[in-house]
Image (spheres, helix red, strand yellow):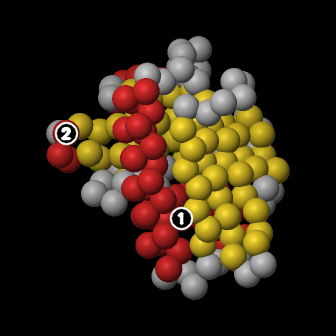
Amino acid sequence: MNNQPAYSVEREFDIPLEILWAAWTDSVALEEWYHGTQHSVVPGSMRSEVFVGGAWSVAIDVPEAGMVAYFYGEYTEVVENARLEHTLYYTESVDEFNARDMSLPHHNIRIEFEAKDFRSWVKFSQFGDLPEHDAIQAQAGMESYFDSLGDYLSIKE
């Protein structure tokens, strides 16, 4: 993996680390928040098998673009309450999403976690070739995901 991410997003939350970890790993929790604030998860599309080699996938409804964004991959590193790493494949084709071809070009994701007194910190980084304009858009999108995460966690406090 290239050592320099295309972009990163990080936040601290007033929540115990175990709750933050569960929000990033539990399929039910992910289906509730893992989308931009103006979007939603397609019901039943979220999958999160949190072990090395385990699959993850999600379909995000993007109504303003009249499309569904499909993401999938597999976990490559899992260190409980500390780090998740996984591959990231993207398509706008439901057929490609259903096929989940892991031989296609992909990016790598690293999600780091840390307890900070009574708070928790998380950092999402995407690695791989991404044109600067696309990296700026992807970062803005992930900022919106983190806003959704904050909304989700506020009801868990």
Is 18 above or below relative to 140?
A: below
In the image, what residue occupies the spot 76% across and 72% down? 116
Residue 156 screen position, x and y as percent: 55, 81
Q: Is residue 56 visible?
A: no
**Extreme residue in the right direction:** 79
| Residue, disc 1 | 29
In the image, what residue occupies the spot 49% across and 65% down? 149
Q: Nearer the viewer, residue 12 or 65?
A: 12
Residue 52 screen position, x and y as percent: 77, 38
Residue 55 screen position, x and y as percent: 63, 38
Q: Is residue 123 visible?
A: yes
Mark 2 Cα-neighbour bin, 10 Å: few <14, some 14–19, many ≥20: few
Q: What is the count of numbered marks?
A: 2
Q: Give the SS element for disc 2.
A: helix
Could you tell me the amino acid type at mark 2?
Ala
Q: CA distance from mark 1 to mark 2?
A: 25 Å
Is 156 above or below relative to 102?
A: below
Considering the image in quadrants, where does the N terminus appear?
A: top right
Q: Which mark is residue 65?
A: 2
96 sits left or right of 57 in the view: left
In the image, what residue occupies the spot 49% across and 82% down? 155
Q: Nearer the viewer, residue 85 or 60?
A: 85
Residue 2 screen position, x and y as percent: 69, 24
Could you tell me the amino acid type at mark 1?
Ala
Mark 1 Cα-neighbour bin, 10 Å: few <14, some 14–19, many ≥20: some
In the image, what residue occupies the spot 64% across and 78% down? 15
Q: Give the SS element for disc 1.
A: helix
Q: Nearer the viewer, residue 71 or 117?
A: 117
Considering the image in quadrants, where does the C terminus appear?
A: bottom right
Point out the frontmost of discs 1 and 2. Answer: 2
